[in-house]
Amino acid sequence: MLLAYFMNLMNKVFMEYLDKFVVVFIDDILIYSKTEEEHEEHLRLVLQKLRDHKLYAKLSKCEFWLDQVPFLGHIVSKGGIMVDPGKISSVMDWKVPEVVKEVRGFLGLAGYYRRFIESFSRIAKPMTSLLEKGVPFNWTKERQAAFDELKKRLTTAPVLTLPDLTKSFTVYCDASKEGLGCVLMQEGKVIAYASRQLRKHEVNYPTHDLELAAVVHALKIWRHYLFGNKCEIYTDHKSLKYIFTQNELNMRQRRWLELIKDYDLEIHYHPGKANVVADALSRKSYVNMAVAFQMPFELCVEFESLNLGFVHHTTVATFEAEPTLEQEIRNHQKTDEKIQEIREQIKLGKAPHFREDEQGTVWYKNRIYVPDVDSIKKLILSEAHDTAYSIHPGSTKMYHDLKERFWWYGMKRAVAEYVAVCDTCQRVKAEHQRPAGLLQPLKIPEWKWEEISMDFIVGLPRTQKGYNSIWVVVDRLTKVAHFIPVNTTYSGARLAELYITRIVCLHGVPKRIISDRGSQFTSRFWEQLHDFLDSKLRFSTAYHPQTDGQTERTNQILEDMLRACAIQYGTSWDKSLPYAEFSYNNSYQASLKKSPFEALYGRRCRTPLFWNQTGEKQVFGPDLIKDAEQQIKMVRENLRVAQSRQKSYADVRRRDLTFKVDDFVYLKVSPMRGIRRFNMKGKLAPRYIGPFKIVERKGEVAYKLELPPNLSGIHNVFHVSQLKKCLRVPEEQAPLEGRMCGRI
């Protein structure tokens, strides 16, 4: 009880210094520092704290300025932590246990140092089985071997590095039917080992749960290190990588997943043959020597350090197959001038990263040095990218695959350039970057109904009157809209009649019409009609109706209104259309800072709710014209501010991209309905076709392309966002099979 009170007192006294540069255990005070100057300051603070609380240290029991110190059965130094030889001397003199109590005592002492002993639970398993209830005491040769092995391991325990809580940790986990094993490491150095035997109910766990149990075991026992720090978990069970995205988990896995989510960790797959560190803690102790020698040299060294037994004799039938590429590299190395210089530097010890093997082949670290021969480099790049077992990886993946075996100056750049000019990659791979083309707003009209935009909403339920679509006509200045019910089968003459009776008779003939290039607008009759009316059709660039954004937005609002009417009133949509038009034209527009009706007529529309607040003015003669001009001037200024704001927002999410005349570009296929290529469509169709030559620049963000005859049905002007630069024109261009059909 007295020790507990004293320990509590010491913790209170040094509360502000604990785990910063002071460790306290009862009456032992450890002060640790990085430099001598820092240590001097820490020592002064501790002695001052003792003086302030009238606590005294006996000088004869104090030690100062030590490089290493014994503490709680360990030797702690800047090099790491090791077993205190003085504390385990009794282990070597420990007599063979004769009763269960003596076995328990020995395992208690050895277990205190289990963090230093690889596969402790596996080694001690024959002895721990004696501790089970009802097992008679029988000291067998197997238990004697385990007893001797533990004594040997304790006297030859390795030095473990001290953790740095400012850096990330690495944990290797593995599980088998014999137990769980894990290793805590940092920057390739071991901090601690941990292992335990399986409990009775755990023996029946499926492999997935056993491997996950090893991860949970590591997180629990090293929580004081891992909680709050970033760590990487390596396991040889690949499916654990996807534990966070799996939909179906049993109750045990869900419970463990809640624990795992408390940690900032990533789970990586590590092949079983490479996961030697943790694997040896949980699996059998014998490894086939033939298998071991097939592994890289580094793995064999790790196996040797794990004190695993090897089976030296095995009968196998083998054959050797070696690609001719490596022999070609060796042959060309003999004539490469740069490699000859490297050989001389190796002999003089001036090339630490290079080495020469027994066959005279020069290596850069563990990667073969590829000579400066274009044919060899091209062969390597082609094999890693174009073959059936590669299937066109990206530059990052391809480089990481190649750098495991090959090296030459500028290899990373060569890989990036090879992938960038690959014709197949440019056709099939999507761009993962901001869309091209800055927003180019249309010029604001000078007067009401001078410029209009129009579009069709199709695919609506057929009404009793035979309507199945809506013709949307919007004034670009005041935003006033007219919604005309039509049928998709209407001829050009019928649409022209509606256009004159519903638009021209109310607002006159517009100077300019912006359409979405639907078939209704491209018919010969429609163009002749507008030529007669002196109207100029301005088409949006093919498959990119950005220039007609006003009508697109109006369509969205109208569709929402009709949905609401269908839910609330249950009537046919064509009966709700006049009310939708009235509501839209009398709704506040942020870009106008008023409603479209008010922008058109200069006053608010009278409604049952606003009967006497229409703001009518008694204005006549010249004042009427002046007032109207002032209203339009205000509307145009509000639109200019809104366009500027919209452009600034849109350009943040876009990138400026320009091409030159005679450049070759690929054309995005996805918006072009009806194209078939290589007899494939849908998901397997290429994303891009081409390349095609640019013949003219149209405005700031559109280009005219030279298309082949079988694409003559497409308007040949495209927005820049639909184009991708061709870095190298292929010698043979794949033909475009199929034909254009449907609406573009």
Image (tube, rainbow, N blue to C red):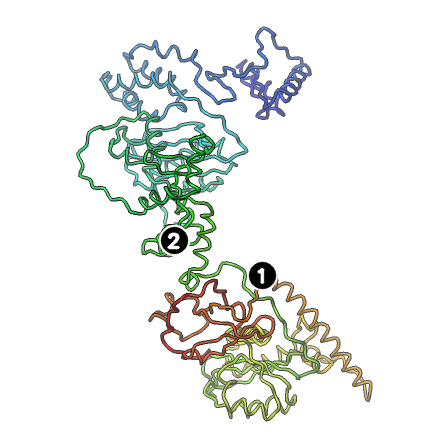
Where residue 359 sits, quadrant-wise, is top left
Q: Can the viewer see residue 196 in this picture?
A: yes
Residue at 64% x, 12% y: name it: 55
On screen, residue 259 above or below 80: below
On screen, residue 178 above or below 686: above
Q: Where is residue 95 in the image (x, y as percent from the top left)?
A: 31, 10
Numbered label attached to residue 378 = 2
Q: What element carries label 2?
A: helix
Residue at 35% x, 11% y: name it: 92
Q: Position of residue 280 (x, y in %)?
A: 32, 30
Residue at 33% x, 33% y: name it: 358
Q: For the residue marked with disc 2, what is the amino acid?
A: Lys
Structural crowding at the residue carrying mark 2, measured as other residues with C-alpha within 10 Å and reported as few (<14), some (14–19) or many (≥20) = some
Q: Position of residue 428 (x, y in %)?
A: 41, 63
Indicate left or right for 415 with 480 as reference.
Answer: left
On screen, residue 610 above or below 134: below
Q: Where is residue 240 in the image (x, y as percent from the top left)?
A: 37, 44
Residue that mark 1 sits on: 653
Indicate left or right for 330 with 632 as reference.
Answer: left
Separation of marks 2 and 1 at Cα, in angstroms: 38 Å
Q: What element carries label 1?
A: loop
- The earlier-in-sequence mark between 2 and 1 is 2
Residue at 55% x, 64% y: name it: 436
Marks 2/1 in contact by CB < 8 Å: the verdict is: no
On screen, residue 381 above or below 304: below
